[in-house]
Amino acid sequence: MKNITLKELGKFSFSIKEAFKTLRTNLLFSGSDIKTVLITSCVKNEGKSTVSLELAKALSLSEKKVLLIDADLRKSVLVSKYASDAKNIVGLSEFLSSQASLEDVLYSTQYNSFDVIFAGAVPPNPVELLGSSKFQDLLAQAKEEYDYVIIDAAPLGAVIDASVISAFCDGSILVICANEIGYRFANEVKGQLEKSGCKVLGAILNKVSNKPSSYYNRYYKKYYGKYSKGKYGRYGYNNYGYGYGYGEEKEKKSKK
């Protein structure tokens, strides 16, 4: 197995870290039979790849053995954003097309018990590769060796890849960008997942508004506002879009 260092996208605030811990806890309570989890979105740029990676990291930090599979064979961002050395990386497409062995595409990371398989080169037939018995056998083998297998798939609202993969998975999670994706569209994507027979575990609302009128801001200020002044520093929203709350400056204005 090869080794690779994953780059940090940025320093997450206390609220973002807590959001991922909550997501991890919710997944752990979904049942012992939920081991292969598909993560997709309606369209691109909703944050599914970041969510997939951070969830996998959070699970590994709770002493779970985790494999992250980048199954977005059309337009992956994991290598360009997170791989410390993007040269000569072979991945899932090479393995499924029998150009590389599993040992060639499996990378260990700096996090204990956290391995990753990158997408690899863009193939001309992604649906056929992802729907193959070889991919199904890979997931079956991974379930035997890992506690959780997190699969980052292409947006289901754009291409059918995630629906094909979900037929082999125990559960799925839909990442939805707040104020950009309509209810009907999100419901149609959810319906596509359900048609495959895959259990929809829930949805992640991402890039939530930081406006004071936001329900999420009001809720989190009431219950967690005290952390904004303590040892955790500012407790609020940042550019990555996970977590909610107020910073110290906004709290002072609300008291006037």
Image (cartoon, rainbow, N blue to C red):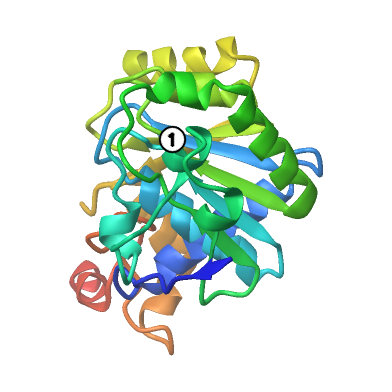
Left or right, residue 126 beside residue 61: left
Left or right, residue 210 beside residue 218: left
Residue 61: x and y in percent read 62, 71
| Residue 240 can be seen in this image | no
Residue 21 placement: quadrant: bottom right
| Residue 64 can be seen in this image | yes
Residue in view at x 70 percent, y 46 percent: 142
Callout 1, which amino acid?
Ala
With respect to residue 30, does 25 lie above or below?
Answer: below
Looking at the rendered structure, the secondary structure element under dot 1 is: loop
Residue 8: x and y in percent read 34, 72
Residue 15: x and y in percent read 42, 66
Q: How busy is the neighbourhood of tag 1: few (under 14 within 10 Å), some, or many (20 plus)? A: many
| Total marks placed | 1
Residue in view at x 78 percent, y 41 percent: 31
Q: In this figure, which residue is indicated by the disc labeled 1? A: 153
